[in-house]
Amino acid sequence: MIRFSLNGTPAEIAPDAMLLTHLREALGATDTKVGCEIGRCGACTILHNGAPMNACLLMGWQVEGAEITTIAGIASVPAGEVLVRAMEIENGFQCGYCAPGVMMSLVGLLSRDAAPSDDMIEEALEGNICRCTGYHSILRGAKLARDMLKETTE
Ligand code: FES
Ligand code: FES
């Protein structure tokens, strides 16, 4: 078995198991959502050692010793709490289906660059598909989080 950490808790996975399926079905971590399962929709985005990745494209052998963070662990990530607050203010949680993946893509960006440009924010969301109302409130929330983070570092 391969050992990794899930939101700070030790976990195991078979080398040939898909991380997304294992999270949801073996570990009960249903906060990470299933969409296309072929790396196109971003619903399953998690952080792998701080970098946003699609859990449907990761096999067990690829997470050996890794810190995997899902939306349930977002408060432990730098910028995580600020991003959640900003999304609440801007109503960025449009649906529970794609929001977890959107949040993990954004928190990955804000953790490595607390002052990304508008273009960088849009690029960070290129792999996250919203099929409903569009990205307006999501983008407003992301930009507010960036502005709030800037204030704390000035
Ligand atoms: S379920 Fe992984 S990208 Fe769509
Ligand atoms: S916010 Fe989930 S489909 Fe648009």
Image: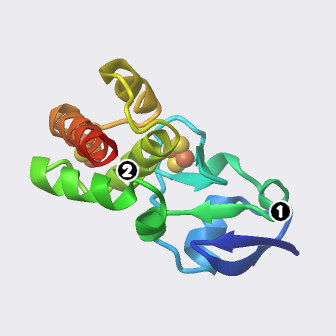
Q: Is mark 1 on a helix, strand or loop?
A: loop
Nearest the eye: 50 or 29: 50
Q: Can residue 13 be seen in this view?
A: yes
Write down the residue under mark 1. Answer: 64
Q: In this view, does 150 lie to the left or right of 39?
A: left
Q: Which x, y percent locates residue 32?
A: 47, 62
Q: Would you place residue 146 above or below residue 61 in this image?
A: above
Looking at the picture, which amino acid does disc 2 mark? Answer: Met
* First along the sequence among labels 1 and 2: 1
- Which image quadrant is residue 64 in? bottom right
Which mark, by number, is residue 103? 2
Q: What element carries label 2?
A: helix
Residue at image x 38%, y 45%?
102
Nearest the eye: 152 or 57: 152
Residue at image x 81%, y 65%?
65
Neighbours of disc 2 within 10 Å: few (<14), some (14-19), many (20+):
many
Which mark, by number, is residue 7? none
Q: Which x, y percent locates residue 29?
A: 52, 74
Q: In this view, does 105 lie to the left or right of 6?
A: left
Q: Would you place residue 8 above or below residue 149 in this image?
A: below
Q: Which x, y percent locates residue 67?
A: 68, 63
